[in-house]
């Protein structure tokens, strides 16, 4: 089973470049384009999240909401 990567990058060309690199490294890479990023991460937790810090129109307090999701989950390796 390959590891999953989620890319939250507003520049489509850059997002595809990052996805190609991660795919070459064995990840199943997905690009997140719009919606509630925290909800997406909660519902489909990736193994790695590539997040552009200054996303236009980004949700405020995003880091505070994502940090708890980054904690180790019991029974997961």
Image (tube, grey):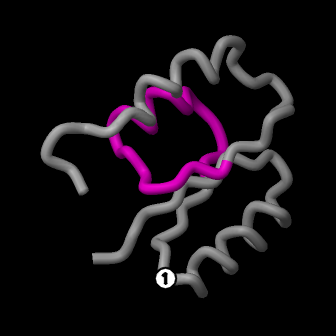
Vertical relation: 39 (above or below) 72: above
Residue 37 lies within the magenta run? yes
Residue 12 lies within the magenta run? no
Along the line of sight, the residue nearer the viewer: 65 or 33: 65
Which residue appears at 21% of the width and 50% of the height? 76
Give x and y (percent) for residue 61.
Answer: 66, 12
- Which residue appears farthest toward the bottom when viewing the image? 24
Q: Quadrant of residue 41?
A: top left
Vertical relation: 44 (above or below) 5: above
Q: Quadrant of residue 60?
A: top right
Residue numbers of the magenta segment: 32-50
Q: Which residue is mark 1?
A: 26
Give x and y (percent) for residue 1.
Answer: 27, 77
Give x and y (percent) for residue 73.
Answer: 25, 38
In-image side of 28 versus 60 (left or right): left
In-image side of 71 versus 74 (left or right): right
Which residue appears at 86% of the width and 32% of the height? 54
Vertical relation: 53 (above or below) 68: below
Label 1, secondary structure: give it: loop
Which residue appears at 75% of the width and 24% of the height? 58
């Amino acid at each position: 089973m390959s590891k999953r990567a989620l890319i939250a990058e507003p520049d489509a060309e850059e997002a595809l470049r990052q996805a190609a690199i991660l795919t070459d490294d064995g990840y199943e890479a997905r690009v997140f384009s719009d919606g509630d990023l925290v909800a997406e991460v909660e519902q489909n937790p990736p193994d790695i999240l590539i997040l552009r810090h200054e996303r236009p129109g980004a949700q405020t307090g995003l880091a505070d909401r994502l940090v708890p999701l980054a904690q180790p989950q019991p029974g997961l390796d």
